[in-house]
Image (cartoon, helix red, strand yellow):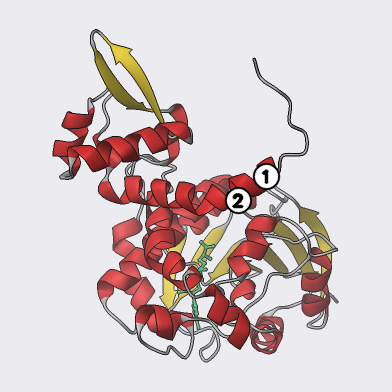
Amino acid sequence: TKSSNEGFPHSLVELLDGFKASKTLFTASKLGVFDVMSDSGLTVDEVAIQINASVLGTEKLLDAAVSIGLLHKLKCEDKLVYRNTEQARQFLVSDSPLSLHAYILHCNDMIWPLFNHLESAVREGTNQHERAFGKKPENVFQDIYFKKDDMVMRFMNAMHSIAKVSGRDVATAFDLSRFRTACDVGGCTGAMAYEFTKAHPDLSVIVFDLPAVIEMRSHFQPLEQDSRVSFVAGDFFKDDIPKADLYILARILHDWSDDKVHGLLSKLSKTCTPGCGLLLSEILLDEERTRPSRALLQALSMTEGSQRSATEYSNLIRKHGFSPVHTRYTDNLLDAMLFVKDD
Ligand code: SAM
């Protein structure tokens, strides 16, 4: 029989174990557990061989993964076998269309080390790149891009996986039928841009991003190429940004201080004529800045940026002559706001 224990702090105990659950997901992903699974199920010994790990450690990892809903464990004839859950099949297998695998590796390799130094980050009010990775970047993108190609690829893979999961909901959040040309500023692999052209048959999208990113774009092109998506390399703080009648800023402004955001918005505002659009996509905080916790937890490892509410974004963007038209909370990873340049 189950006794009720209303005073017990279940949610706190869950938080105590939260990091163990995250690391179980990261490690299983990194070792390729979800990739080697077959529909008929694999025994511990079979998985251990395939992921090149000890039987003892593999058994613990698989059982932990079962306990947090990532795998099924079932009896098949006289053997115990493990199998991917439906969610793992859809989002954790590395080559599934909506895979979060690359983003999970980014969390393990880039974000986890930063969180190891959270106490210092809070005391000092600075990001912890130097402690975590042994070097002091001027900003996180310099760190990533001025290093080696594999770092760029890892970052692009991570962005690509989130953009693929959230892109459709962002692209279809508003009626954009009056726009013909868009520029996806900091558009990375083009994953969002392709969602926009898919959703809007009359729209062409220029993806604008740093040269190191644009150089790697061929690794991320969909099988069905779309001539309405093109790529231009440049620095959005220093170089001219291509002309367009809709500017997309997806996951850009949260990386930067208000000062830098004003610099970028003022450039965009100068190239925009009345009626031009600005589509912002971010996690929007509620007005009290208390939710969603996903955004506030992410902010702990952010470099110089911050998370903002719809009103805070509106206030920043209004200063550059744009008025908010619609806000869409998508229930996906990213929300969206549409602004139009005033007359
Ligand atoms: N918009 C994409 C998305 O939502 O999937 C990528 C978002 S990612 C967080 C930020 C992007 O901004 C990266 O692709 C990065 O290379 C680009 N970026 C950062 N600094 C830049 C700069 N100074 N000029 C152009 N692009 C820049």
Query: Residue at the location (48% across, 73% down)?
Result: 208
Query: Residue at the location (79% across, 65% down)?
Result: 289
For this view, does 201 lie left or right of residue 262? left
- How dense is the environment of label 2, judged by Cα within 10 Å: few (below 14), some, or many (20 and up)? few
Disc 2 marks a residue whose amino acid type is Leu
For this view, does 291 lie left or right of residue 69? right
Residue nearest the viewer, comparing 189 with 304:
304
Element carrying mark 2: helix
Element carrying mark 1: helix
The percent position of residue 327, horizontal first and vertical second, equals 79, 56
Task: Look at the picture and state if 133 lies above or below 21.
Answer: below
Residue nearest the viewer, comparing 252 with 287:
287
Disc 1 marks a residue whose amino acid type is Ser
**What is the spatial separation of the Cα atoms under label 2 and label 1, in whole angstroms?**
6 Å
| Residue at image mark 1 | 11
The percent position of residue 234, horizontal first and vertical second, equals 45, 83
Q: Quadrant of the C terminus?
A: bottom right
Residue nearest the viewer, comparing 263 with 143:
143
The percent position of residue 90, horizontal first and vertical second, equals 43, 35
| Residue at image mark 2 | 15
The percent position of residue 268, horizontal first and vertical second, equals 66, 81
